Image (tube, rainbow, N blue to C red):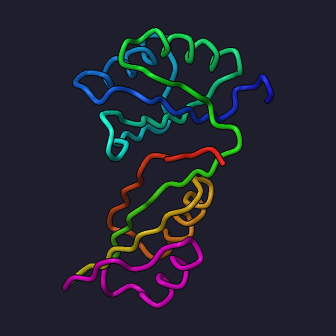
Amino acid sequence: MTTDNARRVISVIVVNEASVLSRITDLFSGRGYNISSLTVAPIPDTKYSRITIATLGSVKTMEQITKQLHKLIPVLRVYEHEDMVEKEMALVKFDITENLSDINTICEAYNGKIVNAGETTVIAMVADEPKRIDNFLNSMKRYNPKEIVRSGAVALER
């Protein structure tokens, strides 16, 4: 790993209880660390949740964050992902008059498709790596999206 201010992804396994997320985000903000993406979901069939955090920082910064996270009572495990599978999802709403065939073709190239069609709008969904989601959203600008929603990152070690 380099010592530069690189994008880092960490997972925090916590007891699923009130105020845990608040304490973790307070730790980041109190030390001036920015969170670029935050995703929280319960771990099936347990009393725990996985918090996936994407941030920028050096190796030293990540070590400090990890040490501070371990001091929080409901935190069970903290690890930085190195060899991981990482995905994000995006939903994009278009006017029904846009070229839906082209939109669907581009969606398919990014592991997606049109998932909903109404009288006046359609909604496309893609799920891919964060940089590919960036590329997808840039390519969709020409179709005049009415609204865009993007999830945070989720990651698992290989």
Asked if residue 133 is positioned above or below residue 156 in the image, the reply reads below
Closer-to-camera residue (102/27): 27
Would residue 119 be found to the left or right of residue 100 on screen?
Answer: left
- State the image quarter where residue 1 is shown: top right
- State the image quarter where residue 97 is shown: bottom left
Q: Residue at left 62%, top 52%? A: 85
**Residue, far front:** 45
Q: Position of residue 89 (x, y in %)?
A: 45, 59
Q: Residue at left 39%, top 85%? A: 98
- State the image quarter where residue 109 is shown: bottom right
Q: Position of residue 137 (x, y in %)?
A: 51, 63
**Residue, far right:** 2
User: Is 106 within the magenta?
Assistant: yes
Would residue 14 be found to the left or right of residue 16 on screen?
Answer: right
Q: Residue at left 42%, top 87%? A: 100
Asked if residue 94 is positioned above or below residue 60 in the image, the reply reads below
Closer-to-camera residue (54/42): 42
Q: Position of residue 23 (x, y in %)?
A: 34, 17
Asked if residue 102 is positioned above or below residue 116 in the image, the reply reads below
User: Is 54 within the magenta?
Assistant: no
Total numbered labels: 0
What is the span of residues highlighted in magenta in the rendered image? 95-119
Q: Position of residue 134 (x, y in %)?
A: 57, 57
Would residue 77 be found to the left or right of residue 120 on screen?
Answer: right
Asked if residue 94 is positioned above or below residue 1 in the image, the reply reads below
**Residue, far bottom:** 101
